[in-house]
Every structure is written in C-alpha cells, then in structure tokens.
Image: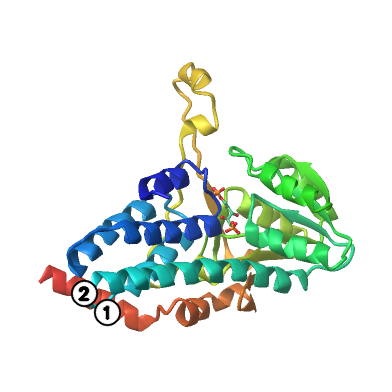
Amino acid sequence: MLLNETAEQIRSMEIRGAGRIARKAAAALRDHAAGLETPDTASFARSMKEAADLLVATRPTAVSLPNAVQTVMRSFEGAGSVAEAKAAVKTAADSFILSSRHAVEWIGEIGSRHISDGDVILTHCNSEAALSCILAAHGEGKAIEVFATEVRPRNQGLLTIRALNDAGIQTNFIVDSAVRSYINEVDLVITGADAITVNGAVVNKIGTSQIALAAHEARTPMLVAAETYKFAPRTILGERIAIEEREAGEVLDPRIAAGLPHVRVRNPAFDVTPASYVDLIVTEVGAIPPAMAYCIIRDYLGWGIGEFHKEFSIDQMTKE
Ligand code: RUB
C-alpha cells in the first residue's frame, strides 16, 4: 500500500489500535523502501527518514508506532548498498509484523491464566491484546461473562462486542458512565495500552483511568495487556507522552456547536492511569508489576542509560 494512503488511514482511524497501527506502519515502510529508486544509501536513508516522519506524525500517543518505525529504520544502518538496505528493511519489517502477531497470542495465553472459570471481566475500548486474553480463557472452556463499554466518541466498543459475540461470549454492553454501577459485579478489569511509561503508568483510551479508579475503590484487580513495544523508551529521558486531542466534531455536531459560542469541546483521545492502580501488565515475555517497566525498556527495547549518553552527545555535536 502507498505510504500516504497508510498515513491517512492511521490519521483518520480507519487503521486504529496501537498494535495494528505499528504493524501497518512497518509494512508501509517496507513497501516504500521496495519502490525507492535512489542512487545511493544516503539518499535512500533521507527518503526513508521522510517516510518515517510522516508516519510517526499521524497519531502522537501510541508509542508502538515510533517503536515499530525505529525498529525498521535501525535495520539498514551501515548497509553497503541500496539493495542491501532494502533487504534489511524487508527483513526487519516482516519480522516485526510476525513477532507482533505472536506477542498478541502469547499475551492471550499468559493473560488467560489470570482468568478463572465463572469470572466477570470488564474491558474498555477495542484492544487486540485484551481480547486475546478473554478469547483464550473462553477457548479453554472457562465460563466467562464480559462487560464492554461503549467508548465515546468513536464507539470502539462496537468492535469489541462484535468480536465477543462472534466467539459466543455472554456480553453486557454499557455506556461509559455505567462502569461504577457494575464494578462490584466485576472480578477483573482487562484493558490494552497505547503507551507505558518508565514509572509504569498506562496510557490508554480516554476513560481507562476512571475505570481504574472505580476498580481500585472496589478492590477489583486491573490487568493491562500490552506487547513490549508499547513501552516508551524516551520516558527514561524525561519525555512525556503526548495525549492526542481530536477534533470537536467527534463529540458535538458542528451545527449544534455553531449555536453555542461560549462552549468549547474538549476531546482527548487517551488518558493516564497511575501505576498504583494497575495490578499487573501482561506482556509476551511474562506478567510483570508496573514497577518493572524500566527492565522491559532496557531488556527488550534496547534502550538503556547508554543510549541517553549517545543521544546527548549527538545533540551536543549538532549544536557545536
Ligand atoms: C485504541 C486503544 C486500545 C490500545 C491497545 O485507541 O486505546 O486500547 O490501542 O490496543 P484508538 P491493541 O481506537 O484511538 O486507536 O491491544 O489492539 O494494540
């Protein structure tokens, strides 16, 4: 698929969900590289950098996107020819896509061990990783029931209830504001994540932090299902996760808004749940307490304090 087309599909949310976005971005870079006709590796690198920047700018919150792009972009560093660089990009993109799919499966296997026969689970938004846990538990024959939220304003809950229904799982569909009314009937909350910071805070669909708060008060455990590439390396350097604010028209019909000059619509797409409200993060390399986020970043994303020094010296060099 063409690069600009993929970028537009991510921007418009035709392609959505942090894992899917990451895989599509990797595929778009791979296809872009294959079609490039550049005379040398330097111009190849420049064109790939432009493509990478375009993709990363589409949605600012899900760090799976820059992490996937970074994986592909690092693959051709030091390539001796354009052909070698193209081959490296293809291998890196294909292997990212494959390992991402496997990660979602493994998360399902690990996450399902935290689900008991007879459990009532609440989920929010539409997360492949969270659904993988729920579907795996159901596949193991556990009799589970799910509460799924509507997820205003984009109604991703509709995707979730369809998947649950198709699997034959008993599901209750509720408006977002009904969570507290049902939280005492829920045994476990499972959500996905768009980003996890070095202090274990979880960035996910708007409303997740309210659900976590209600779950915390009700002593209902909260599980977050997230592949390792959802962890945000640059939070080690103090970088904050940007929370995407989408257009007002998603929340309020512009014709109504036009008659309300004193009303400003706010439409953040994500929020931050503090680590203290999260019991466990289920990754493809195991279930970890949020306090171990740094270890995941160091061990699986290859970003340690050494990278910081490297970045710092590069910054310094470009200033000098
Ligand atoms: C999607 C969302 C999902 C995470 C995880 O938001 O918040 O919970 O991306 O999803 P949006 P997954 O619909 O705005 O992209 O587990 O599928 O990666």
Way the structure is coloured: rainbow
Task: Measuring from the top left, give residue 237's x and y in whole percent.
Answer: 36, 71
Where is residue 279 drawn, in percent x and y? Answer: 68, 70
- Residue occupying image coordinates x 28% and y 75%: 77
| Tally of marks | 2
Q: Position of residue 150 (x, y in %)?
A: 69, 41
Q: Amino acid at mark 2?
A: Ile
- The residue sitting at 48% across, 56% down in the picture is 24
Label 1 crowd bin: few (<14), some (14–19), many (20+), radius 10 Å: few
Q: Quadrant of residue 288?
A: bottom right
| Horizontal and vertical percent position of residue 13 | 51, 44
Between 102 and 236, the one nearer to me in the picture: 102
Rendered image quadrant of residue 108:
bottom right
| Image quadrant, ligand 1 | bottom right
The disc at residue 310 is 1
- Residue toward you, 86 or 280: 86
183 vs 26, nearest the viewer: 26
Mark 2 = which residue?
314
- Pointer 2 local density, CA inside 10 Å: few below 14, some 14–19, many at least 20: few
Where 125 sits versus 318, above or below? Answer: above
Res. 195 in view: yes
Q: Secondary structure at mark 1?
A: helix
User: Looking at the rendered structure, which numbered label has been put on residue 190?
Assistant: none
Side (left or right) of 80 relative to 68:
left
Q: If the image is split into quadrants, where does the C terminus sit?
A: bottom left
Q: Is residue 219 visible?
A: no
What is the spatial separation of the Cα atoms under label 1 and label 2, in whole angstroms? 6 Å
* Whether label 1 touches label 2, CB < 8 Å: yes
